[in-house]
Structures are given as C-alpha cells and as structure tokens.
Image: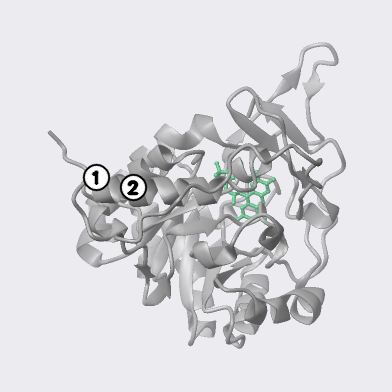
C-alpha cells in the first residue's frame, strides 16, 4: 500500500477506524457530486443507490464504516464472511503492508453464525444501504446452513458465496474445477429461494470464463470478481514466511490490471449475453480504477484494501465516477458498463 494506514484490523478481522487527531483531516474528503448523473445500478434485480460496494472482510460486519462514510452514498456493504462456528483466524502476524498492496493471512476470523444472527444481522435494518451477506465454509453443508439462515433475513437481499479464500486450506476447494463449483452452487441455490446469489471467484489467470459459467449454471445470479491472489512472501533473514502461513492473499493496486482483464474476459465471454452482473473488485483506489472496471463490464465496483489507507476513499471514487459519466455525455453511470472499445 505504501501509505499511512489509517484503519486497523480489529477483533475477529473487523475494521477499526482510528480517531482522527484534531486538525488533521482524513487524506481525502468527499468531493462535490454531480446531481445530473444517475448513480443507481441494478444488481441482479436489487437496486443499489450507487455502484460502490464495500468488500467482504474489509468493512466490518454491517455498520462500522458509518463513522467514516455516508452509507447512503454506498450501494452495498458486504459482511465479513460468516462460518458456522466462530473462528479466531490465524495467529499474528497476519497482515503485511506490501509494495503495491496488502498481503493478509486473516483466515476468515469471524464471530460465527449464531452470534452474527443475534448481534450483527439486526443492524442491517438500520443502515441506509444494501447489505450483502458473505458465506464461507469448510463443507457444502456449512454453506447450505448459513445461506438458508441468511435467506430468511429481509434486510440481507443478496448472499455472496466466498468460494475463493486463499487463506484456509479448503477455502478454494469448490473452485478446483468448473464441475465441482457448479455442484456446490447448485446445492446452495436449492436452499436459497428469496435472496439473490452471488459467487465470488478467485483471480484465476486461466479458465476463468469456464468457472464463471459453471457458477451461473449452478444457479448464481451474479459474480463477484475477485478475491485475493494466492501468494508467498519470504523473510530473507529468518528464511520463513513473513506471516503466520506459508501462503496468503494479495490485494490492492497490484492486482487491479489483472482483475480488469478477468472482468472483461467474463463479460465478453458470456456474462453480457446472459445478462449476468459482475461486481468488479480488486485494487480500486481512485475513480479511474473504478471506471476501468465499469468499462470492462462491471455493473458495480468493490473496494477493500483502499479502505485501510483512507476509509473515506469511496466518497471520492463516487464523485469522480459522476464527473466522468457526465464528461462522457452519459445521464447515468450504468450506461458505461461494458463500454470498452476493442479498437
Ligand atoms: C484484510 C482482508 C480481509 C479479507 N476478508 C475477506 C473475507 O472475509 N471474505 C471474502 O470474501 N474476502 C475477503 N477479503 C478479500 C476482499 O473482499 C477482496 O476480494 C480483495 O481484497 C480484493 O479487493 P481489494 O484489492 O479492493 O482489496 C479480504 C481482504 C483483506 C485485505
């Protein structure tokens, strides 16, 4: 990230915002918006006020970012990924400020389904934004149990299946083949009748279109692209991993061009024709990063790592997108989805 980190990872992986020292403003205050531009977007039948989505695991459980942001200007917040049992996550150290992003080995730390339903889910009714419920698990049965609990909640209209976490030994098992992914998604789909279902894919450099098609064949209404990139980082003095695991997830600036390519490939490869929306997610730090993902085919744009450097950056990104849409002669940001010109 290479920037002063203003936010920290708190208990169970949630985001903790710092007190702003008197007289020192956040790095970016929100810029004036353009009332002429329609910011609404349709994410598989659910209307979002804006295309900005806060990414799973980087914005707390539900309402934590309200201290820094007007959540009415955020299209949706995604919960921390929830598992059946509480998980402490991996031992420290589990986060590293890398040269062009962040490396983490959090390991799906979360309060578990029961406590989430008791303490966190009711907050979804109190925030002026949509809430996407992120589900993780070590077995198909675990995904099904959590997803069907989420399906009963009025204020969580969208469920996101995290089948792409590189920080647990089985976090990406379902993505080991398109056939496997299709069967796992189909079992969850059968348990979800009211909610829209998103599948969050890994940044797989080959075969991403087949994986995306399999998710949709299994019953996904949309895709989130992508999770972190599986990487290693070695301390040359100790000759051991810099974090508490040998393999970890890389996010932030460095993965952005890869994610633009993957979103484009899936959009052009089948999602555009099939009418399947994509949340483009990876390395968005400013409005141009977000605009690139929209041009590549993203209906909405996720932000994660950028929140740690500047928790208010989504305000700035949205204001920039509005100005950009107007400068492109568009009445709405959504007109620019997939508007990349090949030549
Ligand atoms: C500290 C941290 C924790 C994360 N936790 C989760 C998680 O619980 N569930 C999930 O689906 N993705 C998780 N992610 C991945 C992000 O949601 C996102 O897919 C990824 O960081 C790429 O976006 P970015 O470059 O904007 O951060 C986490 C990422 C970070 C940096």
Does residue 206 show up?
A: no
Q: Which residue is drawn at 63% across and 37% down?
A: 27
Q: What is the number of the mark on residue 327?
A: 1
Task: Answer whether labels 1 and 2 touch (C-beta < 8 Å).
Answer: yes
The extreme left residue here reads 343
Residue sitting nearer the eye, 2 or 264: 2
Q: On the rendered structure, is 177 left or right of 340?
A: right
**SS class, disc 1:** helix
Q: In which quarter of the image is the C terminus?
A: top left
Quarter-of-image position of residue 156? bottom right
Q: Can residue 148 be seen in this view?
A: yes
List x then y, in percent, for residue 222.
40, 65
Q: Residue at x 65, y 37 (%)?
A: 309
Q: Is mark 2 on a helix, strand or loop?
A: helix
Q: Label 2, on which residue?
A: 323
Q: Where is residue 290 in the image (x, y as percent from the top left)?
A: 41, 45
Foreground: 28 or 236?
28
Q: Which residue is drawn at 54% across and 48% down?
A: 30
* CA–CA distance in space, label 1 to label 2: 6 Å
Q: In this view, does 26 lie above or below 42?
A: above
Q: Quadrant of residue 241?
A: top right
Q: How crowded is mark 1: few (under 14 residues within 10 Å), some or many (20 or more)?
A: few
């Amino acid at each position: 990230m290479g920037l002063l980190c203003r936010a920290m990872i708190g208990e169970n992986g949630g985001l903790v915002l710092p007190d702003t020292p008197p007289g020192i403003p956040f790095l970016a205050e929100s810029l004036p918006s353009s009332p002429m531009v329609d910011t609404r977007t349709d994410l598989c039948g659910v209307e979002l006020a804006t295309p900005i989505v806060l990414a799973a695991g980087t914005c707390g459980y539900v309402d934590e970012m309200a201290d820094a942001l007007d959540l009415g200007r955020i299209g949706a917040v995604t919960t921390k990924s929830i598992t059946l049992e509480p998980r402490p996550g991996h031992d420290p150290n589990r986060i590293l400020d890398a040269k062009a992003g962040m490396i983490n080995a959090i390991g799906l730390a979360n309060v578990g389904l029961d406590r989430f339903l008791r303490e966190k889910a009711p907050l979804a009714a109190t925030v002026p934004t949509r809430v996407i419920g992120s589900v993780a698990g070590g077995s198909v049965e675990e995904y099904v149990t959590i997803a069907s609990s989420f399906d009963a909640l009025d204020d969580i209209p969208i469920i996101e299946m995290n089948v792409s976490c590189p920080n647990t030994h089985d976090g990406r098992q379902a993505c080991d083949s398109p056939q496997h992914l299709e069967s796992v998604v189909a079992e969850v789909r059968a348990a979800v009748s009211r909610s829209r279902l998103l599948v969050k894919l890994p940044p797989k450099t080959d075969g991403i279109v087949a994986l995306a098609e399999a998710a949709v064949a299994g019953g996904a209404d949309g895709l989130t692209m992508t999770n972190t990139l599986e990487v290693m980082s070695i301390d040359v003095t100790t000759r051991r991993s810099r974090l508490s695991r040998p393999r970890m997830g890389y996010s932030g600036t460095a993965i952005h061009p890869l994610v633009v390519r993957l979103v484009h490939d899936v959009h052009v490869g089948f999602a555009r024709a099939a009418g399947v929306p994509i949340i483009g997610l990876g390395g968005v730090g400013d409005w141009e990063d977000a605009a690139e993902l929209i041009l590549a085919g993203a209906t909405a744009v996720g932000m994660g790592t950028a929140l740690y450097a500047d928790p208010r950056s989504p305000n700035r990104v949205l204001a920039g997108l509005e100005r950009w849409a107007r400068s492109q002669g568009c009445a709405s940001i959504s007109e620019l989805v997939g508007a990349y010109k090949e030549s």
